[in-house]
Each structure stands twice: as C-alpha cells, then as structure tokens.
Image (tube, rainbow, N blue to C red):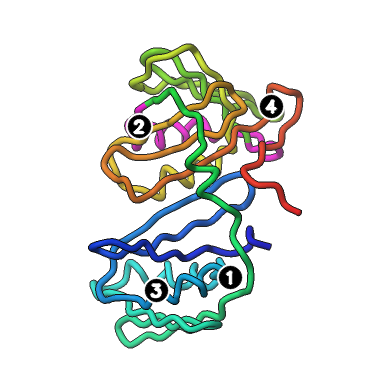
Amino acid sequence: NGLNGVRFERIPGEEEAFRMVSTDGTRLSLSQCKFLGSLNPEIDEVFENILFPQNGLNEIKKLCGVGDSNWTINFGERESLFEKDGVKITIAMIAGQFPDYRALVDNLNIPYKAVVNRMDLLDTCRRVGVFVDRNNKAIRMELKDDSAELFSKNPDSGSMKENVSVEYVGKERKFSFNFYFLQDILKAVNTEFIEFNLGLDENSAVLITTPERSDCKFIIMPMRLWLGGNSANKVYKTS
C-alpha cells in the first residue's frame, strides 16, 4: 500500500535535491532539500518501486537536531544506510508505489489565499484546542476580510471561539479541519507566516504553503461536519 511509506525522489538540476512525500489519505506533505555530491540517475527507477517506512525515518528524525554534522546516505536496492557522527542506521525499504501526487498538486483549483502569522495561529489553536471533541477532533475556521475565527465545541466541557488577524480577500468561508493535523503543520515549519490556498468550496483540498519557502507544501482535506458527519474527505482513496 503506497500510503504506508514515504516516497524519496531525486530532483535533477544544477543543484540536485531530495524530495520526500508522504500521505495517509486525508493529508499530504511534501518537502525537499539540496544535497552535496551526486546520485546515479538509475536510482530514479529504484525510488519508483520502493518506499521508506515511517518508523525508520522517525528514528532518523530524532538525531537530526543533535550536532552540526551532515548526514551521509548510501542507497541500495533494498536497504539504505544513514550515517552521522559515528552513528549508522540501516533502513530496510519496502516494496510499493506511491500514488500520483503530482496530478493532485498540479490540478488544484485554489483561487483564494489567506495569509496569517504562524505563531499567532498556533497559539490560538492551542487555546481553542482545549475544547476540541476528542471523538471528531474538529476545529472550525471561519474566514472574513481581516480575521479568522477559530471555534471548537465539546459536548462534555463547553466551547470556545477566538479570532486571529489574517490577510484575506474573498467571500466568507467556513472550514472544519482535524485539529491535530492542522497543529502538526504549524509545528513542522519555522517561518513567520503561513498561507492557506483555498478552493472554490468548503469541501475542496486546502494547500498550505509559506511565503519564505518554496520547498515544502502541505495538503489537508476539510472534514465533512457541515454534511452531518465527522469524517475527513480523502486526498487518495485506499483500495
């Protein structure tokens, strides 16, 4: 199943880069970074048919903030070796093909944009999140010309709403997101501002980007609360 692993991809050019893409069906993240050295283009065929397990990459992530050294990575057909500061981690790759994420990203119809200070939004989410219903995990966002109202409600403890300033031109919009998904995105980047690129209706995919960086993108699907349910729309359908 292509949703169980992370896709690695070589991005050719004057300065080659790695791209990593992951999805769980209701959200997708894409990030890339430049690397020193070179890769044989034949690795592209290997990357087309293998995925990196999430658990293995989580172990790599734990060491990323330790020391200033770069990672050295050696790719094989079934295993990859990650080395840093004398630590060696071998990751067994899994067979599988990732969904065609390019078709999704390239075909998004997102004519509206809202720009908000990331930390202001994150702090507001933390406060409003106190009343998030742990069953449906939903937080509602209502966009107006110069503000976004965040609202949560828990039948057992109460509700809360709070506004945060935004730059937005367009009709008033209401969305419901999985609170934890939105919070994960806000924590994953360290830029000052974050952009919500919006579709034509409240059930369309939302592309979240940052003005300062073009090398990371997030897609999150609104939840169908306004249709009487509490599930999220799907980025990809599982077979």
The residue at the point 51 percent across, 19 percent down is: 142
Query: How many numbered marks are there?
Result: 4
- Which numbered marker is on residue 49? 1
How crowded is the residue under tag 3: few (<14 C-alpha within 10 Å), some, or many (20+)?
A: few
Q: Are marks 1 and 3 in contact (CB under 8 Å)?
A: no
> Which is in the foreground here, disc 3 or disc 2?
3
Residue at 58% in and 33% down? 177
| Residue numbers of the magenta segment | 115-137
Marks 2 and 1 sit apart, C-alpha to C-alpha, by 41 Å
The numbered dot on residue 41 is 3
Q: Which residue is mark 4?
A: 225
* Residue 150 in the figure: left or right of residue 26: left
Check the picture and name the quadrant holding the C terminus: bottom right
Disc 2 or disc 1, which is closer to the eye?
1
Q: Nearer the viewer, residue 132 or 49?
A: 49
Disc 3 residue type? Pro
Secondary element at image label 4: helix
What amino acid is found at the position of numbered circle 1 in the picture?
Asn
* Lower position in the chain sequence, tag 2 or tag 1: 1
Q: Is residue 220 within the magenta segment?
A: no
The tag on residue 120 is 2
Identify which residue, 163 or 15, lies in the foreground: 15
- Give the prevailing secondary structure in the magenta stretch: helix
Residue 174 in the image: state x and y as whole percent. Answer: 55, 20
Looking at the rendered image, the disc whose residue lies closer to the viewer, 3 or 4, is: 3
